[in-house]
Amino acid sequence: NAGVTQTPKFQVLKTGQSMTLQCAQDMNHNSMYWYRQDPGMGLRLIYYSASEGTTDKGEVPNGYNVSRLNKREFSLRLESAAPSQTSVYFCASSADFLYEQYFGPGTRLTVT
Amino acid sequence: GEDVEQSLFLSVREGDSSVINCTYTDSSSTYLYWYKQEPGAGLQLLTYIFSNMDMKQDQRLTVLLNKKDKHLSLRIADTQTGDSAIYFCAESIGGGTSYGKLTFGQGTILTVHP
């Protein structure tokens, strides 16, 4: 039982490049989330998927898209990376929308 | 709107108790959480309290909730060097457009000195 896994662990992009961050959970959770963590700011919600087949914007969705591929997987895509997207990205899942969230180890992204 | 505030730093001696404080603004909070983040790692759920409770104890951890003052605290008894980490307070809202979403504080960096 691996919990929440994320790939890659580290990534460096040039401005304008695109990439997809992958997240998978093996806990049969209904809800999944993407956050970014910036120094001194806590975590901010980018997008979430309350259940398979639905996605909604969080607090800071601009510049990102998401896909809930199936119940296990929730990916985050940066279409044209910008230096302001340099951050640590965390995926999380919860059994249902109001239940406690379990986090993956994070992806450290640098955009130059 | 939701806003969660924490002090940024706390330094304690090994063996002492640590108290990490958090204030929140949304009175419709349903659950309040404490997460721990060790260097280079993800967030680990430590404990949570439902908003109709005043206190919850779990081994060395005690959570106190003062709903009137919208104040949440986490007390760690007999603090050890392995407790050095960033501690995040978070709230989730039980209704309205914020239903189910977590709002995090900035995190408190706890440093434990031998």
Image (spheres, coloured by chain):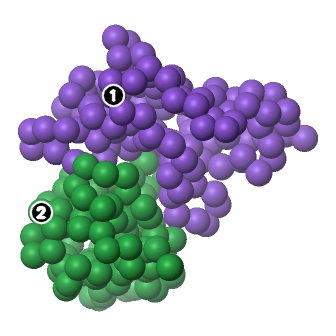
Does dot 2 land on a helix, a strand or a loop? strand
Query: How many other residues sit within 10 Å of disc 2, few (<14), some (14-19) or many (≥20)?
Result: few
Q: Residue furthest top?
A: B68
Please give left or right for residue A105 compared with residue B68 in the image.
right
Query: What is the three-letter code of the residue carrying label 2?
Result: Asp
The chain letter of the green chain reads A
- Residue in view at x 10 percent, y 75 percent: A53
Residue position marked by numbered label 1 in the rendering? B51
Query: What is the three-letter code of the residue carrying label 1?
Result: Ser
- Residue in view at x 37 percent, y 69 percent: A91
Instruction: Tell which subunit mark 2 falls on.
Output: A
**Are the residues under marks 2 and 1 on the same chain?**
no
Q: Residue furthest right?
A: B114
Q: Position of residue A58 (x, y in %)?
A: 19, 56
The chain letter of the purple chain reads B
Residue position marked by numbered label 2 in the rendering? A56
Query: How many other residues sit within 10 Å of disc 1, few (<14), some (14-19) or many (≥20)?
Result: some
Q: Quadrant of residue B92?
A: top left
* Quadrant housing the N terminus of chain B: top left
